[in-house]
Image (cartoon, coloured by chain):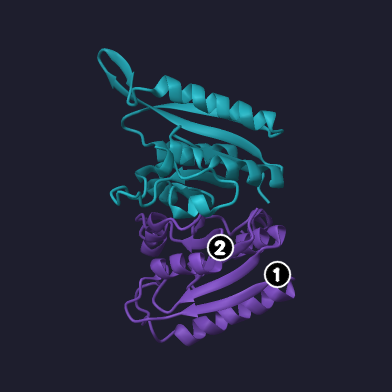
Chain colours: A purple, B cyan
């Protein structure tokens, strides 16, 4: 039912919770998968991190994920966009138009350690722009998809 | 990949946009579907009143949609929960997901309208905070019309 899926990721743990779902959605649908990273923070890394220092690391991580997914037989590619003060949600939305994507998968925050409710601003803005359906994986989701769930239960 | 899917609907046109996705996701996964609707009540001394004047129509519509899903071969049932004004529909949906052990919630929501005035639905927003599982959000935006098998834009019709 999906032909072209975008996984919007900033390489954070939060974003990584979406990985099991990305794998299944892209695999089962034989969809083309684009890992999209915007240089500006996507979901927002935790406070205390310089937002620019880690970026090369994030690119490496994204490239590594692409290789892993390709090894699993998924048609995955990486796409990096950047810009100072760029609007990540807008960039995701533009990528959707450009690639003709029919689904965006994004990991977002549930609660922060203080128990405060939190929704990534990029996720929220993306939903407002509404370029296509968005599969939102909250951080509090117990370690991922149905496949991940048993693993999580086993390790818990 | 999903076993139990909740379709959270308020019976609106925006919510209806999620239905084709519910159908596809559920049939591909062989998941059971619960069409979940929160009937909001204003309760006073005179008894309870529906917050939405056309609540009975909406409930009937949702029951019809659940029946349509069943006719399509899905294991679907409706779940209409009455809530008083102190409770939020989002909480009701999240609680239902926990209770049913659901692994996906599908919800249609408003994106930017052509008027530019409508923002993300508040129930969707809250649900993303409360949901124990992923939430598949179907916007009523330009993306909806671009999607395969979607009807023409609601804006164009209305």
Percent across and percent down for residue B74 are: 69, 34
Q: Which mark is residue A101?
A: 2
Percent across and percent down for residue A153 are: 64, 55
Classify residue B84 as left or right of residue A18: left
Q: Which residue sits at x=67%, y=44%? A: B3
Q: Which mark is residue B92?
A: none
A29, A156: nearer the viewer = A29
Classify residue A49 as left or right of residue A33: left
Chain hosting mark 2: A
SS category of the residue bearing label 1:
loop
**Marks 1, 2 in one chain:** yes
Q: For mark 1, what is the residue?
A: A74
Circle 1 crowding by C-alpha within 10 Å: few under 14, some 14–19, many from 20: many
Percent across and percent down for residue A14 are: 49, 66
Q: Is residue A32 above or below residue A141?
A: below
Q: CA distance from mark 1 to mark 2?
A: 16 Å
């Amino acid at each position: 039912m999906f032909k072209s899926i975008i996984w919007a990721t900033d390489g954070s743990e939060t974003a990584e919770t979406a990985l099991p779902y990305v794998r299944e959605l892209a695999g089962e649908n034989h969809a083309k998968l684009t890992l999209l990273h915007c240089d500006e923070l996507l979901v927002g890394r935790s406070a205390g991190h310089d937002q620019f220092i880690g970026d090369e690391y994030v690119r490496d991580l994204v490239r590594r994920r692409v290789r892993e997914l390709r090894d699993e037989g998924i048609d995955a590619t990486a796409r990096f966009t950047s810009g100072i003060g760029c609007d990540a949600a807008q960039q995701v939305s533009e990528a959707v138009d450009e690639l003709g994507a029919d689904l965006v998968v994004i990991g977002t925050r549930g609660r922060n350690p203080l128990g405060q409710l939190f929704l990534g601003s990029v996720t929220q803005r993306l939903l407002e722009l509404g370029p296509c359906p968005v599969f939102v994986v909250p951080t509090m989701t117990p370690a991922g998809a149905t496949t991940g769930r048993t693993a999580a239960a086993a390790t818990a | 990949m999903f076993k139990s899917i909740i379709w959270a609907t308020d019976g609106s046109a925006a919510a209806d946009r999620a239905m084709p996705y519910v159908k596809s996701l559920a049939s591909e996964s062989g998941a059971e579907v619960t069409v979940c609707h929160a009937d909001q009540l204003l309760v006073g001394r005179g008894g309870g009143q529906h917050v939405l004047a056309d609540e009975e129509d909406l409930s009937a519509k949702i029951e019809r949609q659940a029946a349509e899903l069943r006719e399509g071969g899905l294991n679907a049932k409706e779940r209409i929960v009455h809530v008083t004004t102190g409770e939020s529909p989002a909480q009701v949906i999240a609680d239902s997901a926990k209770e049913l052990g659901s692994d996906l919630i599908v919800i249609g929501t408003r994106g930017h309208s052509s008027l530019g005035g409508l923002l993300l639905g508040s129930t969707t927003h809250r649900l993303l905070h409360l949901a124990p599982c992923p939430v598949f959000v179907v916007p009523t935006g330009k993306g909806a019309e671009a999607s395969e098998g979607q009807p023409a834009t609601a804006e164009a019709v209305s």
